[in-house]
Amino acid sequence: GLLLYLRQAGKTIQIPFLTSSTTQTSYQVSAIDIDQKNQVWLFIDGVGLCKYDRKKHRVSLITETLKYASCIKSDHSGNLWLGTTLGIYKYIPSTGKYSFKSLPRAVTSLYLDQQDSLCISTDGGGIFMMNIKDEKMVHPLAANGEELFTSSAIKGMLKDKDGRIWVATLRGGINIIDDHRYRFKTLTPDPLQKNNYHNYFISSFAQDASNNLWIGTDGNGINYWNRTKNSFVNYKKE
């Protein structure tokens, strides 16, 4: 379910999910995001779209129209975009209604590049870019018509404090996107390139307060990049 770390108390508490008849503590959260009003939205597998009540410390169901989603992203207007195996859904909280746009591959993550540009990563279809105002979608390709990245299976994206977007791929290592719109380049840092086959399977990114990057892999633990020293350290369970 949903866990909340209380920093001052130094402990983690479990947030219950309240239905009309029961209180559940065993449920699976597949996606989570915080909107501009600091509202926490989450998706519970097999249940639907929910939100977290900060005052009462509980999760409640908002709509069960859609049962499964892999990711959520809130835009500047307060609307929610949800990725699924079939495409993306747009949810408007003020009306409680969904709209849908299909995609050829399952959506793995969503990233709001600029105010009106949504980056949609897919498993096997690369990245799609959509203007959220007119909802027109494009699939950027290299000049030769091929995919831009070292793998078309994209797991996630992170924009660092220098404006670069890090792209996590399966079987293709790390790719980096320039901050200029639609200008892409691919890089795989040398320390991750040949050390281990699993380092090509990148699953996630996180940036800490010191601007260092934590890189999650599938099967090889976590890699830590110290930017000041330009050094990598690998952490994994022996």
Image (cartoon, rainbow, N blue to C red):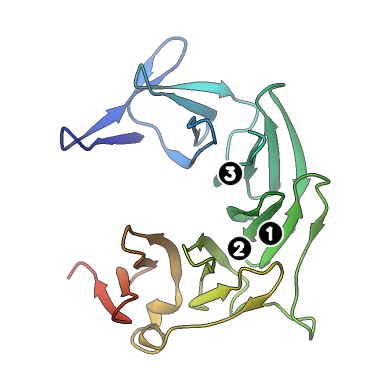
Badge 3: how crowded within 10 Å, few (<14), some, or many (20+)?
A: many
* Along the line of sight, the residue nearer the viewer: 167 or 46: 167
> Which residue carries the number 1 mark?
105
Alpha carbon separation for disc pair 3 and 2: 18 Å
* Along the line of sight, the residue nearer the viewer: 76 or 66: 76
Q: Position of residue 82 (x, y in %)?
A: 62, 42
Q: Specify whether residue 103 is in view.
A: no
Quadrant in the picture for residue 178: bottom right
Question: Is residue 74 positioned above or below 178 on the image?
Answer: above
Task: Identify residue type, mark 1.
Answer: Arg
> Which residue carries the number 2 mark?
123
Q: Residue at x 52, y 62 (%)?
A: 155
* Along the line of sight, the residue nearer the viewer: 4 or 172: 4
> Which residue carries the number 3 mark?
73
Q: Is residue 116 left or right of residue 238?
A: right
Secondary structure beneath disc 2?
loop
